[in-house]
């Protein structure tokens, strides 16, 4: 059934006019655009290292180096003096950081009352790429350069190639050092090193293992092991929320070591022996337990008592009857 496109269903009225390069000094971020995710003036403290912070930092570095490939959204100011930036604050910041003189923009005709609606649409419907996925895809794109730099033991103090007119890029080895990549992608050091380890495994047809010195090494892998490795990395590449590039090797290594290994039977007698020792300590020092916490602890202990085996319960009942004569008849506790 076709839905009529009435005014009620078309709340956002915006018309793209043209896409062009606009001088940066004519563009001003709209206050609502700056505050959309909570800026420096928001009540919430800025948390560096969050996914949103990593995304913004990586985008700024990319624009600083190469310019913005995705157009920002601007509209003419009400007085026709300059432009309001409605979407693309990180792109503008990156252009400024890179010393660029213009920003690639799409000019839209939109009324001020619709600014907020447009910001909501472009921000909430934009697909987010997870940081591990972004790092792994970048490393795979520059596989040869990254591996060459890793083998040359590139200077770890390198700060990355700087974009912008008149700024000289670092030599290849330093431009693709671990630290340079970390800065460029605005991610954690461990994510880059984890990704480089993945590249080495792919090149050698191997899987990682940790040696006695807790250093990662490579070993030849079976076809089945390679499939498991590739499946794990594919999950990271697709942005699976439970996949971690910085710890993928630990996960794979642990899985391969335990797979097919029969688990030793649990020594439940030892479990009870340890629990008894802990209970003895707790009961001896019961006077130190806060009064408010005692009812809850007692209730939990009673739940355990309900699961007592018959032989255990028989002996337990005899001890209680001896310590508290008549308790089972009267229901009252009278210590002998």
Image (cartoon, rainbow, N blue to C red):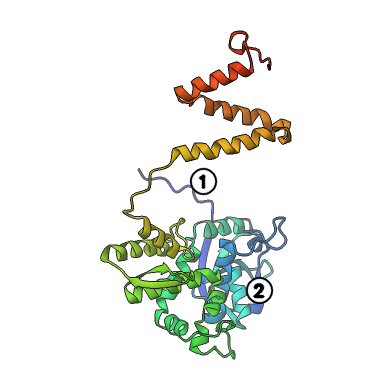
Q: Is residue 318 visible?
A: yes
Is disc 1 surrounded by few (<14), some (14 to 19) or many (20+) residues within 10 Å?
few
Taking 221 as reference, is 215 left or right? right
Residue denoted by label 1: 8
Badge 1 marks a residue whose secondary structure is loop
Q: Earlier in the sequence, mark 2 or mark 1?
A: 1
Work out whether residue 314 or residue 305 is closer to the camera in this orientation and state it: 314
Residue denoted by label 2: 82
Q: Is residue 13 visible?
A: no
Looking at the rendered image, the quarter that the N terminus falls into is: top left
Taking 77 as reference, is 217 left or right? left
Badge 2 marks a residue whose secondary structure is loop
Seen in the picture, residue 315 relative to 183 is either above or below; the reply is: above
Q: Quadrant of residue 37?
A: bottom right
The residue located at (51%, 48%) in the rendering is 7
The residue located at (38%, 47%) in the rendering is 264
Q: Between marks 2 and 1, how big is the CA–CA gap?
A: 32 Å
- Residue 66: x and y in percent read 52, 81
- Residue 192: x and y in percent read 50, 72
Is disc 2 surrounded by few (<14), some (14 to 19) or many (20+) residues within 10 Å?
some
- Residue 12: x and y in percent read 54, 54
């Amino acid at each position: 059934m076709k839905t009529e496109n009435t005014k009620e269903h078309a709340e956002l009225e915006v018309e793209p006019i043209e896409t062009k390069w606009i001088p940066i000094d004519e563009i001003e971020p709209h206050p609502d655009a700056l505050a959309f995710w909570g800026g420096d003036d928001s009540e919430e403290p800025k948390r560096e290292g969050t996914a949103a912070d990593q995304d913004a930092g990586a985008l700024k570095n990319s624009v600083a180096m190469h310019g913005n490939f995705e157009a920002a959204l601007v509209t003419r100011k009400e007085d026709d003096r300059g432009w309001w930036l409605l979407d693309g604050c990180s792109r503008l910041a990156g252009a400024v950081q890179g010393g660029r003189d213009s920003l690639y923009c799409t000019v839209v005709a939109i009324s001020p009352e619709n600014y907020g609606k447009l910001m909501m649409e472009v921000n909430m419907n934009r697909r987010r790429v997870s940081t591990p996925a972004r790092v792994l895809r970048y490393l795979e794109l520059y596989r040869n350069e990254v591996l060459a730099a890793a083998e040359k033991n590139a200077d770890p103090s390198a700060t990355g190639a700087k974009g912008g007119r008149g700024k000289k890029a670092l030599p290849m080895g330093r431009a693709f050092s671990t630290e340079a990549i970390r800065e460029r992608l605005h991610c954690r050091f461990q994510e880059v090193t984890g990704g480089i380890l993945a590249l080495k495994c792919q090149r050698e047809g191997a899987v990682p293992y940790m040696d006695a010195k807790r250093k990662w090494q490579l070993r030849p892998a079976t076809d089945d092991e390679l499939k498991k490795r590739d499946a794990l990395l594919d999950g990271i590449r697709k942005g699976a929320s439970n996949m971690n590039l910085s710890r993928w090797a630990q996960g794979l290594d642990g899985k391969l070591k335990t797979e097919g290994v029969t688990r030793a039977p649990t020594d439940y007698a030892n479990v009870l022996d340890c629990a008894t020792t802990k209970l003895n300590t707790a009961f001896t020092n019961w006077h130190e337990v806060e009064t408010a916490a005692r009812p809850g602890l007692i209730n939990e202990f009673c739940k355990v008592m309900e699961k007592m085996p018959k032989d255990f319960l028989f002996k337990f009942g005899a001890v209680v009857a001896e310590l508290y004569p008549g308790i089972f008849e009267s229901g009252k506790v009278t210590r002998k």
